[in-house]
Image (tube, grey):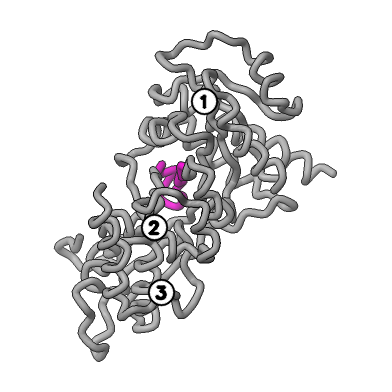
Amino acid sequence: MTGGDAGGRLVRPFTLTGGRTRPSRADFTLITTVTAVEPQPARAARPQPEHQRILKLCAEPVAVAEVAARLDLPVSVVVILLCDLLEAGRITARPPHSVSRTTPDLDLLQKVRDGLGRL
Amino acid sequence: MAGSDRAAPAPAPDTVKILIAGGFGVGKTTMVGSVSEISPLRTEEPLTAAGLDVDDLAGIEEKRATTVALDFGRITIGRELVLYLFGTPGQQRFWFMWNDLAIGALGAVVLVDVRRPETSFAAIDFFERRGIPFVVGVNGFHGEHPYPAEDIREALALPDHVQVLMFDARERASCRDVLIALIDRLIDAAAGATAS
């Protein structure tokens, strides 16, 4: 990677968020699953092109990290755009399974083990 | 994408993650690629956006290192459950990202390169301090394991309860067995927790 390119990559993505570098809410982790609402709300303002790309990607449930990788955008930028979509009622977000060290979920662990055994 | 009938999208699956850690160049992305059902995906995060204070940038000598890459893969356990594997950034200067990554992780696999075991000390220390369960996977380059597991345990000063497994990050079955060993450890701990 050349120095000039790296500098460009750092700045450009945040022009997509109107200069915002922090999300308006904290609903999204790397493995939060997002899904486009079907049908889309009729009266909402027409989404921006980047928002449209995200909506297309999450027609089926997809993790936030995957959205970022497939759009080649930083997670921090994608999260801001996802906040817009969530607030506009265009997507739903499912948080990851909550992991507790004090009360571990044996049933979940067994499912993961069985799934790995099938690989 | 949209089918002929307008069926509602599939319900979102539950998601869990496991971290694949270890020093730089120890085979983390190779392991993720071996077991993932998709080619490893990469996200690049600008350092300034990842919550780094300006003062912390003083330690970063290379000016062009303005992003930190994160490689990850996916294993669909079933329609209702998906496991993600995240390779943690290897260079120590990117460790501020590890805290975020570690939140909500089931556990971790720390990869060790027998030629440079010391590069994995920091990862072992990180998980021990935070009480995050982990197993150690010794990645044999070209599939060779010149040292027995006990030597490596000693070299890394690992407590007895941490399992050391010899494996080959290029082999799917080998990686799968390391992940299963981690889950077995979690299941044992869970059974102990519910029994007491």
Residue B177's mark?
1
- Report the span colored magenta: B74-87
Horizontally, is A3 left or right of A22 in the view? left
Query: Disc 1 versus disc 2: distance between alpha carbons?
Result: 31 Å
The x and y percentages for residue B95 are 54, 49
- Residue at 45% across, 61% down: A32
Q: Mark 3 and mark 2, same subunit?
A: no
Q: Which residue is mark 3?
A: A21
Query: Disc 3 versus disc 2: distance between alpha carbons?
Result: 12 Å
Q: Mark 3 and mark 1, same subunit?
A: no
Judge the density around disc 1: few (<14), some (14-19), many (≥20) Cα neighbours within 10 Å: some
Q: Residue furthest bottom?
A: A43
Could you tell me if the residues under marks 1 and 2 are in contact, i.e. CB atoms within 8 Å?
A: no
Quadrant housing residue B172: top left
What's the amino acid at mark 2? Glu
What chain does badge 1 belong to? B
What's the amino acid at mark 3? Thr
Q: Nearer the viewer, residue B52 or B129?
A: B52
